[in-house]
Image (spheres, rainbow, N blue to C red):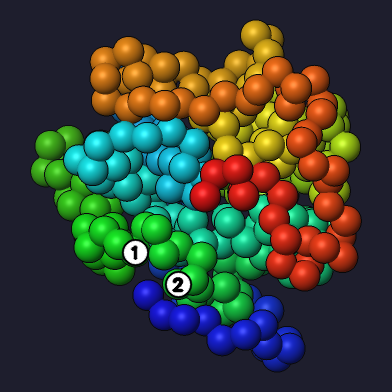
Amino acid sequence: MNHAPEVSADVDLDRPQWVKSIPFLLVHAVALAAPFLVPPTWRLAGLALAVYSACMFGITAGFHRYFSHRAFRTSRAFQLVLALLGTLSVQKGVLWWAAHHRDHHRYSDGEKDVHSPVQRGFWWSHVGWILSARHDRTRADRVKDLARYPELVFLDRFGMLVPAVFALALLAAGGLPALLWGFFVPVVVAWHVTFSINSVAHVLGSRRYPTADDSRNNPILALLTFGEGWHNNHHFYASTANQGWFWWELDLSYLALRALSAAGLVWDLRTPPPHVRAGRLPAPIRSEKDRTAGGEVGVEHAL
Ligand SMILES: [Zn+2]
Ligand SMILES: [Zn+2]
């Protein structure tokens, strides 16, 4: 993990780095070719759905709600399980992910937002910021609480070991069909579904709460992302283990967390107080000027 330099005005940092992105593009090519190389069967579709579910739970409950927002508590051992599941999704390291996500909330849809479609366009918010070199490094000061754990620092640095071992195990167990449908297809789908929260969920959907950003609640995205599509709720009050706040707002990750809580593996699941759900926050929502000066909306409840 490195300290990133202060924000640079160098526009070259914003251009897609095609050489660096070759593995990312190749994984896409393999996933797109998968149905032609090995036509899907019910069994392979089930495998893809199972791995997709593991990836999505790892990202939403793990990288997002636990590591970025500390929305519930767990043991050090289960914390590692969450980190491993998130790392399986090949979305860089857990510290990198949490640091950038905390910055997204700090500056959401402001000038310094890492991936705002309002500021920099849809393409940038969806995937341009990942292809570029601007956000390769992790700001250590954003994730001091996570950097205390050597196992998380190790996973952040050598996280590719996890999907590599998983892919090899699939290949050994089920050959090319298992590798394609148990790894390449679900990982690429999980990528774009996750990226859609950064892009689509700031453009398409309804706004229940008057947040200072353009976050939206989008039921289709909520289904695909296991609950993250209730993104306007989330930007209004970020530190909750549930993002669907009403009975009709399906949140599969929260249902899974409730089950894990009943089993004693996680505890202290934070939920929004009634006055928050009713749209009243203790402090007025800060202005754009305050936010870009370093104030935080929502994250301060979590850290
Ligand atoms: Zn957002
Ligand atoms: Zn968040």
Report whether residue 11 is seen.
yes
Q: Amino acid at mark 1?
A: Ala
- 216 over 212 or under it: above or below: above
Q: Amino acid at mark 2?
A: Ala
Residue drawn 68% across the image and 79% down it? 14
Compared across the picture, whether 236 is left or right of 209 comes to left
Q: Position of residue 255 (x, y in %)?
A: 46, 16
| Ligand 2 lies under 8 Å from the Cβ of mark 1 | no
- 245 over 21 or under it: above or below: above
> In the figure, residue 145 lies in which quadrant?
bottom left
Residue ID for mark 2: 140
Q: Position of residue 227 (x, y in %)?
A: 58, 27
How many numbered circles are shown?
2
Report whether residue 50 is seen.
no
Residue drawn 70% across the image and 18% down it? 274
Residue drawn 83% across the image and 52% down it? 286
Return the mark for residue 73: none
Along the polypeptide, which appears first: circle 2 or circle 1?
2
Q: Position of residue 54 (x, y in %)?
A: 36, 33
> In the figure, residue 114 lies in which quadrant?
bottom right
Neighbours of disc 2 within 10 Å: few (<14), some (14-19), many (20+)? some
**Front position in the image: 121 or 258:** 258
Q: Are marks 2 and 1 in contact (CB under 8 Å)?
A: yes
**Which element is circle 2 on?**
helix
> In the figure, residue 229 lies in which quadrant?
top right
Furthest residue toward front: 282
Return the mark for residue 147: 1
- 236 over 287 or under it: above or below: above
